[in-house]
Image: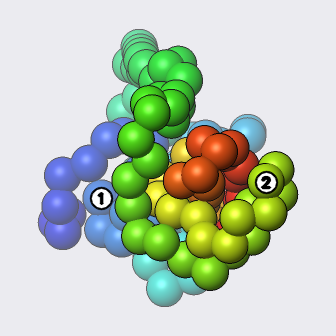
Amino acid sequence: MSGFSCDANFCPRCGTLLSLPDHMDVIRCPHPHCSYEMSAKVLDGVEEYTCKTYDTSRPKEVDKSDELEGPLIDRKCLNCGHNGMVYHTMQTRSADEGQTVYYGCPKCKFQETENS
């Protein structure tokens, strides 16, 4: 009796990915604590299709309007030397990587980015 319903590529008892048999007529679950096995003949004539959709959109550009908004921090502008820049953050890379910090000088409107 199976614990849950799943795709034919997975063990219905423990969920481990099943490998197709090389020269045997039995498919065995490779998990060391599972004894599930089934006849490979069950899969005769079974066709499986997958479809993958990728998000190809680019990250949105930072709005470079005249008014720079955000918290003011103690950071020196590399362009004009003004002490104090506003910043905001955005997750532009994958979730397991740091966020991107955008700094803007309220005096000369110079902007820089930092990948943290």
* Amino acid at circle 2: Cys
Judge whether residue 46 can be spotted in this image.
Answer: yes
The label shown at residue 12 is: 1
Which corner quadrant of the image does residue 37 belong to? bottom left
Residue denoted by label 2: 80
Q: Specify the quadrant that holds the N terminus.
A: bottom left
* Amino acid at circle 1: Pro
20 w.r.t. 90: above or below: above
Q: Residue at x 51, y 62 (%)?
A: 86
Q: Specify the quadrant that holds the C terminus.
A: bottom right
Q: Residue at x 54, y 53 (%)?
A: 106
Q: Earlier in the sequence, mark 2 or mark 1?
A: 1
Q: Residue at x 18, y 68 (%)?
A: 3
The label shown at residue 47 is: none
Circle 2 — which element? loop
- Check contact, mark 2 vs mark 1: CB within 8 A: no
Q: Position of residue 4 (x, y in %)?
A: 17, 61
Foreground of the two, 63 or 58: 63
**Marks 2 and 1, how far apart in space?**
65 Å
